[in-house]
Amino acid sequence: MNIQLQCCGLVIIALLIFFFFNQRRVGLFSEHIFLQTIMLTGISLIFDVLSIAAITYMDALPVLLVNGICRVYLASLVMAAAQALFYVLVDMHDERVYLRIVGHIRFATVAQILLVFLTPISIYSDGVVMYTYGPSVLLTYLFAVSYVIASLVCAVVFRHVIVRNRRIAVCIWMTLWMGAAVIQFFNSQILLVGFASALGMMALFLKLENPESNMDRQFGCFHAHALTQYLDQCYERKNPQSVLFISLAGSKGNETHSLSRSESLVRLTEYLFRFPKAKVFKNNDPELVVLLPNADEMMNIYQRVKEEFWPERKENIRKDGKMGMYPFTFMALIPDILLLDNSDDFYQLLQYLRAENRRKNSADTVYVDGTIFAAMRQRGEIKESVLSALEEDRIEVFYQPIYSTKQKRFVSAEALVRIRNTDGSIIPPGKFIPIAEETGIIAQLGERVFEKVCEFLQNSSVEKYGISYIEVNLSVVQCEQKNLAERYITIMNQYKIRPWQINLEITESASVKTKEILLENMKRLINHGVTFSLDDFGIGQSNLDYVIEMPVSLMKFDMNMTQAYFRDLKAQFVMQAAIHMAHGMDLLLVAEGVETEEQLNGMKNENIDFIQGYYFSKPLPQQEFLNFLEESA
């Protein structure tokens, strides 16, 4: 029997099935369709071998049995070709639509198989060469080739919705299948179709369907892309899933731990594998997302994880006196993902939880409930409000005047962003600034404010009122932009602004996080003539290195520090030391948050150069600011 190629194909299929089942699988619908496809290919190969064996021994077997086996093999070819089309359609429609379309095609496939069984078939065998021919074989080729062509057409025409690797693998598979079919049609003694199908399955497995491709190799769990796919499938099927979100991104200081974040995540992942029903995904670094259909079982996993790794969350000391698992871990329990509408909402919730955890700087566990969902949705609404305000140019700049204690007049102002609603009301900056920072919109917002300040300087005559420069805040996100200096110089040139009219405020957190990029931008802008100030001194991670390394000409005391000066003797000593240090470095000083005459006199006595606060004025809209300057002149 000439079955060497078929046996090789069966070995390939068997190995692929072994590897497929021997690895963790996400449970995606596409995996299920691939399994159907590879099984049908294997069945087709088995009947290919059986048909050759039946023809070889047909003298000793009933004619009906031999013809029946040969017809079943032909029918399996039609089914395998149809399955190829089903596999291509996986990415083109959601599961419900897919099943409806496939159901119609399968109805047609059943009718085709009936025709293959009902039409005549002939068998040729000379003891060495053997094959089938006749109307049944011709119909088989016709139906199978039609499915192959349909698969190729779909892969090309709908390439924008089909996963790239699936498209490539299917094209390889169909090309192999078509080439083998053509050769076998014109040379019936060369039986290549079954082996070509096995090679096509290998291409699919290696290019796309290897479960290993969904794994994060460092941690041994599923990666973030697999998480998105699985979430989309759960939302489509309305499958409830409870979630345990574990993040080691929190930081409370510079303590030394026996294990790094990565090492801790590896141990966590290995431990979570003890719960076979749980699916473990590596999300952002360093985060794990655990999904399980049953909320009670998830609570049990959470308790076990907490007891195993963080029995004493605050100290986390091992018996040998060293720090154990990385202690600054934030966990959140989400009872059911279906409380959200889709995977985008899910990721927005994680982003919200991260932001809240950074704001609170805690390692506590959050139980996600309706209150948190409401807060998250409000956050989304504010984000949309900021984006629409940018699009509709409802961004306004208010100006708070700054008083010089030496010149005894107003010499500058701080530009502060405001957003005006469509009804004319103002959105408080405390509501939208944090969200703009977390979502990255702050960069676009900051640049828009800078443009408006330049436009204001160009169109107004603030210089005649003694205003020498305007202070404009730089966000941390903007400080991360390598082209910041280039963009700002371009804007200043566009509005014909003299560089010394601009003072850019940076915060300590910005200088820490993005020091190298920020220093390069500062160097370029200072060379252009712009000055810098260090904003909110006293509330950040106050380190004298920041003041030493940052080429600023002015330092601003935060309102909280200014107010503390009048309440606490220790705060007075700290502020006096900072004043002495700053003046020793030839830095000018601004005290923010001055609200009373007593505070004004106190800051004057401490030799503060500039005063900013409600004692003189709250932040004012552009025209009101100009009116204020005119009245104060």
Image: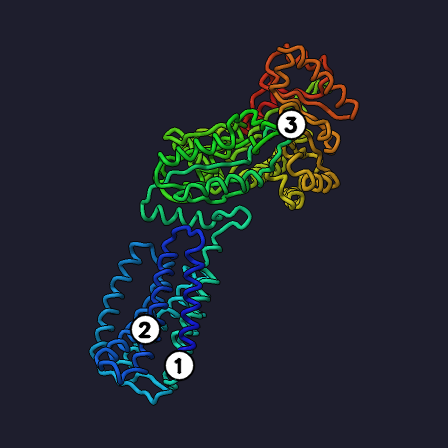
Gap in Å between the C-alphas at discs 3 and 2? 73 Å
Q: Mark 1 sits on what residue?
A: 2
Instruction: State the residue position of label 2.
Output: 47
Q: Nearer the viewer, residue 308 or 26?
A: 308
Point out the residue furthest to the front here: 60
591 and 5: which is toward the camera: 5
What kind of element bears circle 1?
loop
Q: Which residue is mark 3?
A: 541
Q: Nearer the viewer, residue 565 or 373?
A: 373
Element on which disc 3 rests = loop
Q: Nearer the viewer, mark 3 or mark 2?
A: 2
Q: Is residue 471 visible?
A: no
Rendered view: 225 above or below 325: below
Image coords of residue 191 (percent x, y): 39, 80
Frontmost of labels 3 and 1 is 1
Compared to residue 58, the image places residue 568 above or below, namely above
The amino acid marked with disc number 3 is Gln
Residue 304 versus residue 141 in the image, above or below:
above
Q: Earlier in the sequence, mark 3 or mark 2?
A: 2
Q: Residue at x 44, y 51 (%)?
A: 24
Residue 374's image quarter? top left
Disc 2 secondary structure class:
helix
Q: Distance of mark 2 from mark 1, alpha carbons?
A: 14 Å
Residue 299: image location, x then y, percent:
39, 33
Q: Residue at x 21, y 73 (%)?
A: 114
User: In x, y percent, where is residue 555?
Assistant: 70, 26
Q: Earlier in the sequence, mark 2 or mark 1?
A: 1
Q: Position of residue 544 (x, y in %)?
A: 72, 27
